Amino acid sequence: MTERKMAVDVSEELARKGQEVREMTRDVDMLKIEVDVIDTMIRLRGAHGAPPVHAEEAADKPAEPEGE
């Protein structure tokens, strides 16, 4: 009986963690949409927005120091 209860507890914990990951993914997607909208508004007003950067490219580039 205890093995079964432990399996149920682990399954419930995995389900909770999965839900948390889905919620965080949704939050990140919404944030990306907001950034894209801001970038579009900047471009429409005639200023130059940052060129689109894919996540893979951003991870490969070293961080540039500010002020240079």
Image (tube, rainbow, N blue to C red):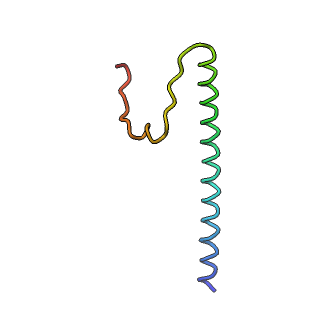
Q: Quadrant of residue 7?
A: bottom right
Q: Residue 65: image x %, image y %?
A: 35, 26
Specify the quadrant that holds the N terminus.
Answer: bottom right
> In the rendered image of this protein, does residue 31 appear above or below residue 48?
below
> In the rendered image of this protein, does residue 23 appear above or below residue 67?
below
Is residue 65 or residue 53 the one in the foreground?
53
- Residue extending farthest to the top is 46
Going 60% across and 77% down the picture, which residue do you hit? 6
Q: Residue 8: image x %, image y %?
A: 64, 75
Going 59% across and 25% down the picture, which residue do you hit? 39
Q: Residue 27: image x %, image y %?
A: 63, 43
Going 56% across and 14% down the picture, which residue do you hit? 47
Count of labels in the image: 0
Specify the quadrant that holds the C terminus.
Answer: top left
Going 65% across and 39% down the picture, which residue do you hit? 30
Q: Quadrant of residue 37?
A: top right
Is residue 55 or residue 24 the one in the foreground?
55
> In the rendered image of this protein, does residue 6 appear above or below residue 66?
below
Is residue 2 or residue 47 the one in the foreground?
47
Q: Residue 57: image x %, image y %?
A: 43, 38
- Residue extending farthest to the bottom is 1
